[in-house]
Image (cartoon, helix red, strand yellow):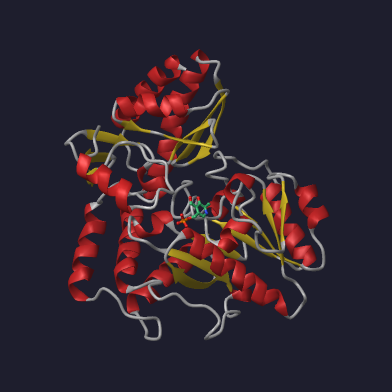
């Protein structure tokens, strides 16, 4: 056990038990490595569920946070905040002409995007959304209603009205589900939690065309694919299709809680004063962190590094696939990688944990790696050696 008895018993007594937890508590991190309460070292192949794209405690990010913490932590959004303005500008310069709203999480970014679409459609009688099966958009009611997975709805029904779910990758199904009341189609460019599902060629482009023809907004949930994850600044650039609204979180803050949506010029001014807000959204501390993350990606060839991660992983995963029939498919982009198995993957996760290698399994059958873009060859080799032993044990 790498969690102290005290921590474990405090959790049992005082923390809402809504998460399944592995028996480890971490107290330090650097790059791809974590140190547990017991002093053990762990190699992290999905740092922060995708948050720590530049690794744990990147020195540039830590220095920016330390510096900002000593100046000003928080001011409310009824004042100007130069760091928020700078971060918005840096995001827009790297994405598409438009404006940014800041919140605190992926779910909140998606809530904002859904509200924007509703407001945009309100004068036209448009209020419905189309989202994709196996999507994941977060746990708040709007984001949860957009998340087309019954297992996350169970016990919380009814979901909000106005959401229609169609299979991911099926353009005809979207076409059939659209009507004059549809205000937006929401999709992850690559589904993350749903199993690292890469869409069929032409799919996202077809959604763009459909939305244009039917006067609907196209929303990309880039909470996982955004900010260099795919080897491009944003997943929409990987796909070659520009959305009207894009949501971000995770990697953007490098570890501090931040969420954002970017609204293209045509909808950028839909949310006027009084229509949407967030107390903490884009405060000086998180914006200093966000600017540091962008600086690191710029200065340390982050996009190239993400693509190198994909090549490294693909090579090793293919070698495994040649030896293990249980591997059904390998897929991903940049530092986002999935190995789909014929069998549930939890046993592999457990075997890796025994060896102090942290690997995630999503959608029961998909080993998911959301590594730092700076993960090394040696670290990758070590992780794959553990995965191989885990597969042998299956
Ligand atoms: C694509 C996507 N959207 C939204 C979310 C929700 O983000 P958060 O947990 O920060 O609310 C996630 C989280 O995994 C995600 O992967």
The quarter of the picture where residue 380 lies is top left
Which residue is drawn at the image coordinates 61% and 79% (left, top)?
Answer: 270
The percent coordinates of residue 112 (x first, y second) are: 55, 69
Which residue is drawn at the image coordinates 50% and 22% (left, top)?
Answer: 318
Residue lying farthest to the front in this orientation: 13
Horizontal side of residue 332 vs 41, given as left or right: right
Can residue 13 be seen at all in this image of the molecule?
A: yes
The percent coordinates of residue 336 (x first, y second) are: 47, 41
The quarter of the picture where residue 76 lies is bottom left
The quarter of the picture where residue 163 lies is bottom right
Can residue 95 be seen at all in this image of the molecule?
A: no
The percent coordinates of residue 238 (x first, y second) are: 55, 49
Which of 129/381 is in front?
129
Seen in the picture, residue 362 relative to 19 is either above or below; the reply is above
Which residue is drawn at the image coordinates 40% and 81% (left, top)?
Answer: 77
Numbered label tally: 0
Q: Quadrant of the N terminus?
A: top left
Which residue is drawn at the image coordinates 77% and 75% (left, top)?
Answer: 125
Which of 90/135 is in front?
135
The percent coordinates of residue 306 (x first, y second) are: 41, 43
């Amino acid at each position: 056990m790498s969690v102290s008895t005290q921590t474990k018993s405090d959790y049992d007594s005082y923390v809402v038990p809504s998460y399944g937890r592995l028996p480890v508590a971490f107290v330090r991190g650097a790059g791809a490595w974590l140190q547990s309460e017991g002093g053990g070292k762990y190699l992290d192949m999905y740092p922060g569920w995708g948050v720590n794209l530049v690794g744990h405690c990147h020195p540039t990010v830590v220095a920016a946070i330390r510096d900002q913490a000593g100046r000003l932590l928080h001011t409310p959004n009824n004042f100007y905040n130069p760091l928020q303005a700078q971060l918005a500008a840096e995001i827009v310069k790297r994405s598409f002409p438009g404006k940014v709203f800041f919140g605190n999480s992926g779910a909140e970014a998606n809530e904002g995007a859904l509200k924007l679409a509703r407001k945009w459609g309100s004068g036209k009688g448009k209020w419905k959304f189309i989202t994709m099966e196996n999507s994941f958009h977060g746990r708040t009611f709007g984001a949860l209603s957009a998340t087309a997975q019954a297992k996350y709805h169970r016990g919380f029904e009814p979901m909000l009205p106005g959401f229609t779910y169609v299979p991911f990758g099926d353009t005809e199904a979207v076409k059939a589900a659209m009507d004059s009341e549809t205000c937006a189609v929401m999709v992850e460019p690559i589904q993350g939690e749903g199993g690292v599902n890469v869409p069929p060629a032409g799919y996202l482009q077809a959604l763009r065309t459909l939305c244009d023809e039917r006067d609907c907004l196209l929303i990309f949930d880039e909470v996982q694919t955004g900010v260099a994850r795919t080897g491009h600044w944003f997943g929409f650039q990987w796909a070659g299709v520009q959305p009207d609204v894009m949501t971000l979180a995770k990697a953007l803050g490098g570890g501090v809680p931040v969420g954002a949506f970017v609204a293209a010029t045509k909808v950028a001014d839909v949310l006027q004063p009084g229509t949407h807000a967030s107390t903490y959204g884009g405060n000086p501390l998180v914006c200093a962190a966000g600017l540091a993350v962008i600086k690191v990606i710029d200065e340390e060839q982050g996009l190239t590094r993400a693509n190198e991660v994909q090549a490294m992983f693909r090579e090793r995963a293919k070698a495994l696939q040649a030896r293990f029939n249980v591997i059904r498919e390998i897929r991903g982009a940049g530092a986002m990688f999935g190995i789909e198995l014929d069998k549930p993957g939890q046993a592999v996760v457990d075997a890796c944990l025994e060896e102090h290698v942290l690997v995630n399994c999503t959608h029961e059958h998909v080993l998911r790696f959301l590594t730092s873009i700076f993960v090394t060859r040696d670290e990758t080799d070590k992780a794959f050696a553990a995965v191989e032993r885990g597969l042998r044990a299956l």
